[in-house]
């Protein structure tokens, strides 16, 4: 398994691409292929952490994939190291030319550089492909320029994946990502209300930087850490209007036909389909009945998917 490393720990010389690679979608994979096929050097991905816009503009940047989630995906694609470049205001003031010379050439020892056709970097995003060409023209460094990937619906991008997930369009998100969208959380103690209703739920603590689908009730597959078993589940994202409207938004998962102690375990959730919005019921009996309906709907949906 590859691990997250800092620039000072890089194995070199490298065949490298730099970018956020959020989602590792089909466009990213084109870049990765060009890095990996240069087999003379160590195939490497480098990303800034945190995202530059978080540092410069205090924007919250929710990620399709957190750095540690990328590791098994990148390894399967042939990447040997994922380098996190600490982004701060000092680095943001580095000129584009200095970035190529100080970071790419001197620190990361790049011998093969792959970038997208629209790649911009350096102080005020002043650097582009020509900057890299000029800085490396007299050096034994190969530059690969990868065209922007488009399909019938336009440019393939992380923003497009987010839009699809916001609409609960997991099927088309899968087509771009080439894998199911998922997220992982640790099971923490809840109020035990679901269990008292006959539907025990796992309350998940999710990294606040992770992108999640919209509020609602979903059919999902759940995996317990270190297990390959997919467990049919119902997931609720959002507040609990019937139980306590003042409770904060939460992620809860009910594992259908699986009664095991989950406290403290990591669960990976793969949403399959949104089945309804949240509803404030008149009483607990109405809520209990609706959960029964949701459970039957979930089992039927998952059964149809396997056909």
Image: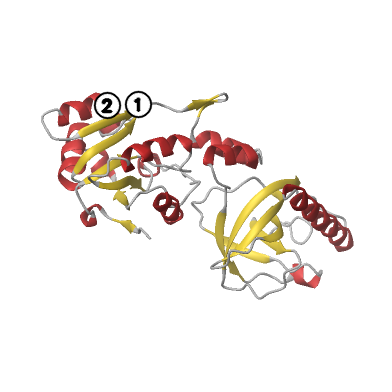
**Tag 2 secondary structure:** helix
Q: Quadrant of the N terminus?
A: bottom left
Given residues 87 and 217, the one toward you in this image is: 217
Q: Residues within 10 Å of mark 1 (few under 14, many from 20)?
A: some
**Tag 1 secondary structure:** loop
What residue would you read off at disc 1? 117
Which residue is depicted at the point 24% across and 52% down?
A: 7
Q: Residues within 10 Å of mark 2 (few under 14, many from 20)?
A: some
Rendered image: mark on residue 225? none
Q: Earlier in the sequence, mark 1 or mark 2?
A: 1
Q: Rounded to the nearest whole Å, what is the CA distance between mark 1 and mark 2?
A: 7 Å
Against 64, residue 285 (above or below) is below
Which residue is depicted at the point 56% across and 61% down?
A: 185
Q: Residue furthest left?
A: 138
Q: How many marks?
A: 2
Q: Quadrant of residue 149 in the image?
A: top left
What residue would you read off at disc 2? 129
Image coordinates for residue 239, horizontal then vertical, percent: 69, 55
Q: Mark 2 and mark 1 in contact (Cβ < 8 Å)?
A: yes
Image coordinates for residue 180, horizontal then vertical, percent: 58, 47
Given residues 131 and 151, the one toward you in this image is: 151
Q: Is residue 75 visible?
A: yes
Left of 30 or right of it: where is 114?
A: left
Image coordinates for residue 67, horizontal then vertical, percent: 41, 53
Q: Is residue 248 visible?
A: no
Given residues 202 and 115, the one toward you in this image is: 115
Against 283, residue 141 (above or below) is above
Q: Quadrant of residue 251 in the image?
A: bottom right
């Amino acid at each position: 398994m590859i691990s997250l490393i800092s620039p000072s720990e890089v194995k070199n010389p490298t065949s490298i691409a730099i970018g956020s690679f959020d989602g590792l979608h089909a466009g990213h994979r084109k870049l990765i292929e060009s890095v990996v096929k240069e087999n003379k050097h160590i195939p490497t991905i480098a990303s800034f952490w945190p995202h530059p816009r978080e540092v410069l503009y205090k924007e919250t940047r929710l990620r399709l994939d957190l750095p540690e989630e990328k590791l098994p995906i990148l390894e399967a694609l042939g990447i040997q190291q994922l380098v996190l470049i600490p982004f701060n205001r000092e680095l943001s003031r580095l000129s584009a030319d200095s970035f190529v010379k100080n970071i790419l050439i001197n620190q990361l020892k790049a011998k093969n550089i792959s970038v997208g056709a629209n790649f911009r970097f350096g102080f005020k995003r002043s650097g582009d492909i020509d900057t890299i060409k000029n800085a490396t023209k007299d050096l034994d460094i190969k530059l690969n320029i990868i065209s922007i990937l488009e399909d019938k619906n336009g440019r393939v991008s992380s923003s497009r994946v987010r839009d699809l997930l916001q609409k609960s369009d997991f099927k088309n998100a899968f087509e771009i990502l080439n894998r199911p969208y998922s997220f992982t959380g640790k099971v923490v103690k809840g109020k035990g209300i679901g269990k008292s209703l006959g539907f025990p739920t796992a309350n998940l603590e999710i990294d606040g930087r992770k992108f999640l689908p919209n509020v609602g009730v979903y059919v999902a597959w759940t995996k317990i850490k270190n297990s390959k078993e997919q467990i049919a589940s119902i997931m609720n994202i959002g507040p609990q209007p019937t139980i306590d409207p003042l409770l904060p938004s939460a992620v809860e998962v009910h594992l259908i036909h699986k009664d095991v102690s989950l406290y403290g375990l990591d669960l990976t959730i793969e949403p399959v389909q949104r089945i309804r919005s949240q509803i404030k019921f008149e009483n607990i009996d109405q809520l209990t009945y609706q959960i029964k309906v949701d459970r039957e709907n979930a089992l039927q949906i998952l059964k149809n998917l396997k056909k």
